[in-house]
Structure formats: structure tokens, C-alpha cells
Amino acid sequence: MCMLQTIRGMRDLDPQLARKKNFVLAICKETFEKYGFKPLETPAVEYLELLTKKGSAGEEIEKEIYSFEDKSGRKLGLRFDLTVPMSRYVASNPTLRLPFKRYQIGSVYRYDRPQEKRYREFTQADIDIVGSNSIIAEFEIIAVVIEICQKLELKNFYIKINSRKLLEEIAKCCNIPNDKIKECFRCIDKLDKIGWEGVEKELKAYSLETKICEVVKNNNFESTIKMIEKNKGNEDCIKELKELFELLKKFSLDKYVKLDLSLARGLEYYTAIVFEVVADGPSIAGGGRYDRLIGTYGSKDIPAVGISFGVDRVIDNMKKGFGTESKILIIPANETIKTQALEFVQKLRENNIASEIDLMNRNISKNLDYANKEGIPFVIVLGDKELKEKKFSLKDMKTGKETLLKLDEIGKLKEIIGK
Amino acid sequence: MCMLQTIRGMRDLDPQLARKKNFVLAICKETFEKYGFKPLETPAVEYLELLTKKGSAGEEIEKEIYSFEDKSGRKLGLRFDLTVPMSRYVASNPTLRLPFKRYQIGSVYRYDRPQEKRYREFTQADIDIVGSNSIIAEFEIIAVVIEICQKLELKNFYIKINSRKLLEEIAKCCNIPNDKIKECFRCIDKLDKIGWEGVEKELKAYSLETKICEVVKNNNFESTIKMIEKNKGNEDCIKELKELFELLKKFSLDKYVKLDLSLARGLEYYTAIVFEVVADGPSIAGGGRYDRLIGTYGSKDIPAVGISFGVDRVIDNMKKGFGTESKILIIPANETIKTQALEFVQKLRENNIASEIDLMNRNISKNLDYANKEGIPFVIVLGDKELKEKKFSLKDMKTGKETLLKLDEIGKLKEIIGK
């Protein structure tokens, strides 16, 4: 029966995965707030006109927007990222105090070809700094990213850094006409998917020279600088990159970053420095500076820089597992003492001990089996004897060890279960 | 420009509101987990066939589903609640261990007439207990609700309780034909909106007797019981309600609950006890038992009971405000010491002091103005003198009081800012 499935490309997060997600999001939130980012939430549905506005998504992503009409004929779409809605929020609030450092965590939607570990609904955790031209803004974004990757104990993570402006200068040196730069970047952006040969083929399909591939593949900052100098190109982008790398070095973060001239980033709105985080595999975060996006919606340009974490990628690769919420299962030995058992579990909860009581009228052995399979670490069987003697036995399901405690020894119980 | 607005009926949560929401959700999550509920997440988009399946939403809500076709012609819809998707999850996982106590927090969508404080996208925080027939399940749901309302310091909250089965028995006593009971309940459910006169009018429009209004308005449990006994109706529902009220009394929770024979609940899937939480105004949570919903998707019925919190209603009525994430703003007195100032703010962050640094190249007075308007409680101005003497002054923006501290006295600083 088809309706029993999630729709193509979307998925349920079962408790195991949902716990991982909660863990990742708690780390993101805590780190974002430490850096002074504040929360914002925007709807999942926006006017299609906003999402497809020239200068926002770009052709590639526009094709992937879930779009539809509501019952009054309004053309709507599900958001494909959190940056465009945030930019709408800024553009529509002209009295907003700057800098606006905001974080947002939410689902975004892309009608993409579903592939392994790519979903049509996925969660992004975003931070953006709106209003600042300072390179310290880029630095802060990268510092947050590194701290989160460290807290998540991601192995071999590093941040690729490039500049769209630099790439433009390179393109100019390689005879790419100004009006073809967008197409050229779109080709280079496909590198991870189609390799260098593929990129060259695509460039040729646009009748573009492939010399840029050589330069970018070489990835040599010094020789690229010389080339741009010789071509009398704009050298601001070089200054910016140098400043950023110096700052990162100053804070011993340079070991986590790498210049990567092939990094173009898919979204059209980026204007200057761009970055992407990789950790043993596909990218888990990406972002950059987009100084003109907000201006496309409002009257004036407002500079901005930010990054998106792809939370699904992180949790799909996470080895770490998480235990049940309940620390203790209370098993009433018979029907008649149910209310007393409930009183006891309510007392545990009052003492902040997450616990549950049999709700299925199962016998003791079936309850033990449930606790075991579920992974609930402790059980307490309560019977007439226990209630009469005001003592109970706390059983550690892993070791099998039982500890005899008085009914009111909640403090001791907490110690044993490690709370 | 229309695209600069959120779409009709949906809204942005600015940082003030988003902080309130985070506060409410943290309380929900903590309380849910203490009672042994585990997290589940399902997509916002489902097959329309699932959402409109007979026995789930019911006619009234079906009209409100955002439905559309994807690019492959699949008929999809945005979820209108979290219960139906969870029921799909359970029905499609026949080996799921029961009881399945799950919580889920997420946005749901209803193409409703937008009214004050009713939104077309709103957040629900749900708990459900799947697999249990025990009245303790109802008790736990209600106990969680009461604890959350207490933690949120909601004034004058109470929980209306009724039983669909009881209401059915009443309907039978009042000559409502079996095949008209759905319509009858739908009329009664509109009471809050249209009043008793309106309900009577609607009943008449269906050619139904209005005697039920009298009984329900009277709200007398004892006389209702007698009426059902006389009519030789099914008395199970009476037993269930009595059991639940006794249990609530035993735990001194009866002061928070009230029998309300007029409570019908809008969703069609409820089968027995239903409840609704009110707190000085419209309902903020509602739920009940739905023993047949999961069965409509799978092969066999699985009993279930749960509740949804309407998070938007709670935050819209919340007086309590929340301060900025940043506790301190660091102001470099001039361009040249920016890097040192950044080193200092990074040190604060390492010590878990949420803080920010000027990113706008503003002068001191403009920075003070920013901190003031933004509500950042403390500022530190760093200049050449401060760095040379390794001392700085911590300014309390509320009292104006300044404290002189050494650059490495982070412990003292923490004490003063109350961390």
C-alpha cells in the first residue's frame, strides 16, 4: 500500500536517528548562542516569486523547488534553503538593528534526484551575519564551524575556502567572457559529481575555453596571484583571502582550512569568499558571502555571510548511539498494586529520574524482556512483599547486579543509576 | 511588493518570539523524556491518500489540507497534524515494540480562514502512547500536560475531559440516529465558535433533534449516567471516566480537570476519552484516545492515546521575555587593536560566556548605543591602555556600574555577570 510509505526522497527519523539529530542540534544551538547568534524562524512555504527571484537560487536549484498553487491561486513553493527567507525577513524589516546575527534550524525541500544520503526534505542549521563587511564575520562563521565539528568529534574534517571574486578574476585571465561566467561556475561546481573530464566537456558544450581547469586544478595561490597581477585584475579578493588566512593562523585554526580554487558553490547568490566543510566524504556544510542577495529584495544592498550545516549528512555518518530516555522500568508484580507502583514511578519522575511503568499488563518475565530489548538500563519489580517491607531491588539490566534499597532512598538510587 | 511578505496565514518568529518558542519546547522535551517518551520525526509532506483516508481527519479538516502534485504527478499534501503520520509509521512497522511512547515536535499546516492567533502553519508538540489499553496511559498524558502547564506558569489552566463513547450514548438517548452521530458531533464541536443557539440551528439543518443540547449543557454526570442506564446503553465509558477521575484524585490532580459533556473534538479519529486544555482563553492543547486510526492503515487495530500542544497559542500569550544570547559586547577602542579584542572575545567564548565583538567598525558611543538598544547586559571597551595595563572595566548597562578587572580574571567576571 503506497500511502504507508514516506513519499519518495523523504524519510522518517526513528528514535535512534532522532536522538542523534537532537544531539547535533543541541551542540549547534549552544555554540551558535555562545557566539551571540539569535534565533529566527520563517515559514516553510513562501511565495514562489521570492524563491525564484533572479540572483537567488540560480537555474539549477530553481528546477528543484516544490511549487504549487493554493486554493486562492497563489503561487507558492517550499523553501529550498533558509538564507533566502532570512533575506526576505531582513529586506522587509528596514529598521532591523545591524549586525543581525541569526541562527535558524529547519527543514528545507529540494525536488532532487534521490540518491543515497541525499533527501528531498533535509534539515539545515544556519548561521548568518548580516550587515558587516568585516573579515571578522567570515572568521566567526568559520570558528563556529570548527568548534561544532570538534564537539561532534568528526574525523578528518577541514574547510575548503575559495573566493567567487578570485574565481571571476581567474576566469577573466582564462578568456571566459563576462556574460558566461555564471555558466562557467556552474560547470566547475559539478566537479565532485562529474570529475575534471566532465567539467571540460561541459565547458566545451558552452563553447568556453578549458584553460581555467588547468589553473584551478593546479590550486597554486602564488602563481594565480601573479597571473591576476599580470592581467591587471582586481586584487581585492586576494587581500581578503590573505587577511582571512592570517586571522585563522593567528588563532591556530589554519590547520583546519585549505584553499581550494575549484570550489564554486551551487547557489547563485554568493559574491565573495565561499567555504565548504568536508569530513571523510561528502560536504556537510557550506556557505559564503552574499553581499547582493538582500538588495535584490529591497532597496539597498546589505552585506551578509553565513553557513548551512547539513544535519542529515552528519547524523547518517554518526557512529555514536544514544540510550533510551527511560532509565528505569517499574514492573508491578500483580494487578492489585498498580496504583502503588504508579505512585512510585511518579515519585521517581518528581526526582527527575526518567522512568516508565508497565502499560501492557504484562507478567514480570515479559516486562524484563521488554526492558532488555528496549535497552532500558534498570528495572524495579514491585510486589506486595516490597511494599510491606518498604524495600525494593534495583536491577542493572546489563550486569544483572541487584541492589536492595529502601523505598525512600531516592538519593542512593540516583547514585547507582549514575544521575 | 508582495513577495516580501510571509504568505497569508503564516508568520516569521522574530528573535523575541523564537526565544519564547525555544523556552516552551525545552520544557516540553524535558518533561516528555522524563515520562519515558522517545523522539520520532516524520516528513512534513505525505501522500494525500494518507491524509484524506476515511476515519482520519474528517471532512472539516480535509478541506483545509494544502494539497498539490509533484513533478511526477504524485498527489501530496502538507500534514495537518502529527498523529496521522505517526500512525502511518506504526502501521508500516509491524515489528515495533509496544508500548511505543513517542514525542514529536513539528510544524503542521491547515488552510484555515486566518483569524487572530490562528495560523496556517503552526507548531505542535505531541505525545502519544501506542499499544496500551490501560487508563494509566490517559493518566500519564494528563499528568504530563499538567506538569508542563505548571512549568510554563499558565494561569487558571484546566483540562476539560469527556468521552466520545459517552457522547455517543447520550446521542442515542436523545434520538440521534447512529448514522448521523458524526454530523451531530461536528455540530457540537462548533460550540465555542457559534454558541448553543448556533449548534441547535446546525442540528436542525441536519433534521436532528436538539434534545442533546439540553443534556450536554446541563453537564450533570450523575443524571447522565441514570439516563444511559435507563436506556440500557453501554456503560463501559462511564467506568473508564470514573477510573480516570479516581486516579487523578489519588494524585491530587483532580483540581485541574473538569468533566465537560460538550467536548467533542474536531478530529474524526477519536474513539473514547478526549481532553482539551484551556488557560484563560482558547484551548492550547487537545487530544484523546483513538483506538482505530492505526488500524485504518494496517491490518489490525492498535489502541493509542495522545495529546497535541499548540505551541503558538502558548507563546502568543506569554508575558515573560528573554534577554539576548550575548551577555557581553566587546568594543575595540580603535582599528589597530581589533585582533587583540578578538582574542579576548574568543577567550570569553572558550569560558562559555556568550559574547560578541563589534563587527561594524563603529565608534565607542555608537557601540554603547547598540548594546543598549539590543539589551546586551554588559560591555567592555578595550583600548591600548587596557591592553598595556592588562586591566579592563566591565560596564553593567542597566546600572551603569563599572568594575575594574584584570584581563585574566575570567572567574570574577563570570560571578559579576551571574553565570
Image (cartoon, coloured by chain):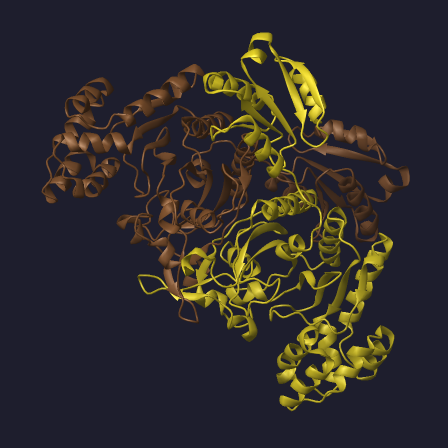
Chain colours: A yellow, B brown
Residue B244, given in percent of the width and then of the height, sits at 37, 23
> In this orientation, which residue lies closer to the viewer: B358 or A224?
A224
Q: Is residue B354 above or below residue B72?
A: above
Q: Residue at x 73, y 87 (%)?
A: A210
* Horizontal and vertical percent position of residue B223: 19, 19
User: As displayed, is residue B120 above or below residue A118?
Assistant: above
B285 and A281: which one is in front? A281
Q: Is residue B217 left or right of residue A308?
A: left
**The quadrant where residue A162 appears:** bottom right
**Residue farthest along the bottom direction in this orientation:** A207
Residue A248 left/right relative to A2: right
**Of residues B45 and A234, the one drawn nearer to the viewer in this rendering:** B45
Left or right: residue A169 versus residue A124 is: right
Residue A404: name its quadrant: top right
Does B328 appear above or below B411? below
The quarter in which the C terminus of chain B is drawn is top right
Q: Position of residue A112 (x, y in %)?
A: 54, 68
